[in-house]
Amino acid sequence: MPTTDALPNRPVWDEGPTLDLPTLHGPVDADVCVVGLGGSGLAAVHELLALGRSVVGIDAGIVGGAAAGRNGGFLLAGPADFHHDAVAKHGRERAVRLYHLTLEQIAHIERETPDAVRRVGSIRLAASDEELADCRVQLDAMRADDLPAEWYEGPLGTGLRIPTDAAFQPMTRARALARDALSRGARLYEASPALEIAGDVVRTPDGVVRCRAVVVAVDGALDLLLPELAPRIRSTRLQMLATAPTREVSVPCPVYARWGYDYWQQLPDGRVSLGGCRDLDMDAEWGHDATPTPFIQQALDTVLRERVGVRTAPVTHRWAAIVGYTDDGLPVCAEARPGVWAVGAYSGTGNVVGALCGRAAARKAVGLDSDVWDLMS
């Protein structure tokens, strides 16, 4: 690592009391078993509870311990592509409908966990003349479809501001959702990896869940849990760092630049969290190893000091996560096996799109229709 003062592979979000949930031992029964207790899995758990179903949820690690609690803390509307690119790929009607669904989901997230969300908007900064021109195309496309966006010129640079976006504390949200689900009768287990998954049974090292359907809701490990989905998914490492509180800069909202490859925000206490630079060593970042690397961390240091302007505040945290990408930028939503409804590979947009997909998978698992599922799949 470029420095030795940072906590090794611990996200800045991992604060406060842990849940310390039990490991699954022996057999349990439920209407639905949810595999993965990140943002999308917990959304599925809550949707199933709202539908009056009994739920068992399991996770290989801790609640929110993978990509759901190790990301940049952005709540951005829309699919993975900028709106004009989404229109070109998926058609105007579909792209606009997806955008509105994500706007609704951000509002839903804010209502569910208001203490974890700051509705402060976001800014896309242009890092080149080409990107500046692309920002103008995006603004024109969004205005044409009556989507909220405005031109930004200010101390951070030039680009677009999206006033409806938000920042949030992902681990705080995940733990709050889990506590609420437990209070409503869900049975949740940590350190209980799924070793065998079928539509009526999920086996862990020490237990078994007997059920009527299964929702598998993970991001970067979906291709490992369900190998038949591997041709549609490519997993990659995303790396981040965070600093001690600083007044060297004032960043009012989540910011992303260089076509989204770099992204940062300043937390309420003054700490700056920053991620990106994956494209500087793209081949090395593909895979399932969630260990920060010296090369990317050094590149992040450079962005922090030279682009963001944090000159002296020490780096206190360095971490990485594995997420899944797809060729078209839309998530995987599939009945991978009879009775096994799988969602994941959110192409970097799991905080909002993943929650939508988790709720959609829950509905499909109990035989109900879902407009979201139809749009995504």
Image: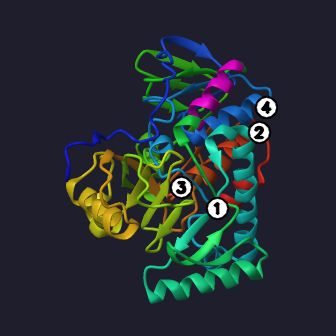
Q: How is the image coloured?
A: rainbow
* Label drawn at residue 87: none
Can residue 232 be seen?
no
Of callouts 4 and 1, which one flags the residue occurring earlier in the amino acid sequence? 4
* Label drawn at residue 121: 1
Of tags 4 and 1, which is closer to the observer?
1
Of tags 1 and 2, which is closer to the observer?
1
Mark 3 sits on what residue? 346
Of callouts 4 and 2, which one flags the residue occurring earlier in the amino acid sequence? 4
Say if 314 sits above or below 7 in the image: below
Say if 220 sits above or below 22 in the image: below
Of callouts 3 and 1, which one flags the residue occurring earlier in the amino acid sequence? 1
Region of the chain picked out in magenta, as a range: 173-183
Of tags 4 and 2, which is closer to the observer?
4
Q: Name which residue type carries label 4.
A: Ala
Q: From mark 3 to mark 1, how far is it between C-alphas?
A: 21 Å
- The answer to whether mark 4 and mark 2 are in CB contact below 8 A is no
Question: In the rendering, at what x and y percent does residue 85 appear?
Answer: 59, 78
Question: In the rendering, at what x and y percent does residue 289 appear?
Answer: 29, 46
Left or right of 257? Residue 363 is right
Q: From mark 1 to mark 2, how far is it between C-alphas?
A: 37 Å
Mark 1 neighbour class, 10 Å CA radius: few under 14, some 14 to 19, many 20 or more = many
Q: Secondary structure at mark 3?
A: loop
Q: Quadrant of residue 367?
A: top right
Left or right of 232? Residue 366 is right
Of tags 3 and 2, which is closer to the observer?
3
Q: From mark 4 to mark 1, how far is it between C-alphas?
A: 30 Å
Can residue 180 be seen?
yes
